[in-house]
Image: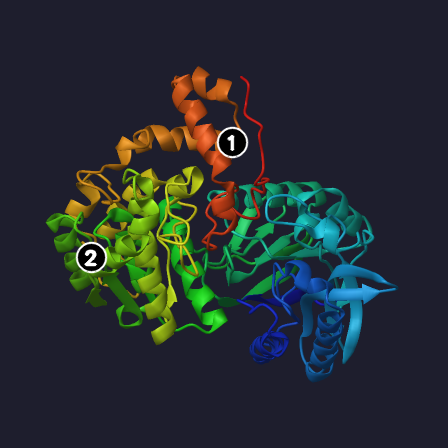
Amino acid sequence: MADTFRLTLAQANPVMGDLAGNANKVREVWAEAKAAKSDMVAFPEMFVVGYNAQDLILKPALQTAALAEVEQLAVDCADGPVVAVGGPLLQDGALYNAYFILKGGKIAHTQLKHHLPNYTVFDEERLFVHGPMGGPYDVNGVRVGSPICEDAWFEDVPETMEETGAEILVVPNGSPYFRDKFDRRMNHMVARVIETELPLVYLNMVGGQDDQVFDGGSFVLNPGGQLAMQLPVFDEAVAHVEFERTAAGWRCKDGPKALLPAGEEQDYRVCVEALRDYMGKTGFKKVLLGLSGGIDSALVATIAVDALGPENVRCVMLPSEYTSQESLDDAEDIAKRLGVHYDYVPIAEGRAAITNTLAPLFEGTEPGLTEENIQSRLRGLLLMALSNKFGEMLLTTGNKSEVAVGYATIYGDMAGGYNPIKDMYKTRVFETSRWRNNVHRDWMSGPEGEVIPVNIIDKPPSAELRPDQKDEDSLPPYDVLDAILFMLVDEDKSVADCVADGYDRETVKRVEHLVYISEYKRFQSAPGARLSKKAFWLDRRYPIVNRFRDPS
């Protein structure tokens, strides 16, 4: 009977649908594990396909190809550590979220996910069938149990594994980020080790997939909840973990413990990683965006530079007669600070042509919002033309406050392929900009120091579509608006709850109305980095046609 057990953890970043590429990552890490004389190498949930595959996982061709990759991995990795890797399994007409144990050239054991999450971004109830509880598998004389992700959030699956002989729990995960989620994970896993009195390995993937970022942060707990090892968040990592048999059972030897950054840094890192992987995994190399001289486009430009490097970012100032000299100066200033390509493209001539074209139809009407939005849509047209001509993906720059209440022009400033700050409220945009000016990390490709001019942060926000326009002409002050939105959107609170918290009922009702009538815009908006449990897309799905209003 062995008294030591070496486990290699692959906190890795799969590419959705790249079955061969993901399988090759398995082979590479397996080779490292073999050289390290590990007994087993573990990969995250659904790693062969990527996660969250949504309805892609229902394609029979993908299911067949994924299983073929797993079977070939078993053959290729027969003379070394046992491989544990996630993927789909079609069995007797039922599709399962499976975890394959590859040993001796074949699939020696298959764990099937029992609890299927069906909340926030997850739809596993409509994709998979519930698997049985399942028991442990043997790795060189050690009995290992692998509750798959959600299965470890409930006590029944781990306890069943412990009762059927499991000595160590290895939990593969595809767990995406939202702020403060790490603490929730840790609390659940501590509960599992206390209940089972077994050491537990929490293995999470990293990397961006559409709006979601998987933040890694894998760790090992010993019975009683003692932290034995902690991997960093967001970074790919391969770690060799040592277990030893004691009189009280298996225990993980003390290992490195990465320090976890604060919430504002994690949010910013998510914005950077989401854009970096969205670009890399879709094949785009460069981005462009409209740089207005305002705070939102300044932060998006900074995120883009930190994600891709200044040489891959084009910023375009598209001034009208309402654009202030201050905005012109600020836009040029931040472009120089970031070191990006900067274009200056006035829209006056194009706007005049459109105005003249529409003049016969608009005769007898008063200029207003329509004419203002022509400016925004003309900018969208010009930016999309540049995007098409030079193969650079257009970024949109609307924050969550604007996206929530529709304070953005569809087919105008909403045009684009990705929005790094879609789930960041305006007040958080200001906070994040100040934070970035004071902090630089080695994962940032942009320069150190005050990259966002203080004047951009301090001046009153304005769309500059008419003389002396300010955002507060049309909206409550952002601290008030964001507080109301957080209650209505993120917490699903009632109008009465907002009023009880001291907010004016008429203001709250107006904000509620704007949220509901803007659903059609969000339905057509670009994806963006998910920072909360109520990001606009999969987390919050509302009908476009909707007459309900809170009567409270």
Q: Could you say which disc has been placed on residue 491 in the image?
A: 1
State left or right for residue 478 relative to residue 533.
left
Kind of residue at disc 2: Ala
Asked which secondary structure carries label 2, the reply is: helix
State left or right for residue 486 relative to residue 184.
left
Look at the image and tell me whether residue 207 can be seen.
Answer: yes
Residue 254 position in % (x across, y down): 52, 57
Classed neighbour count for the residue bearing mark 1: other residues with Cα under 10 Å, few (<14), some (14–19), many (≥20): few
Kind of residue at disc 1: Glu
Q: Could you say which disc has been placed on residue 217 in the image?
A: none
Residue 529 position in % (x across, y down): 45, 53
Q: Which residue is mark 2?
A: 348
Pair 2/1: label in front: 2
Classify the position of the N terminus by image quarter: bottom right
Q: Nearer the viewer, residue 76 or 342?
A: 342
Look at the image and tell me whether residue 439 can be seen.
Answer: no
State left or right for residue 275 relative to residue 204.
left
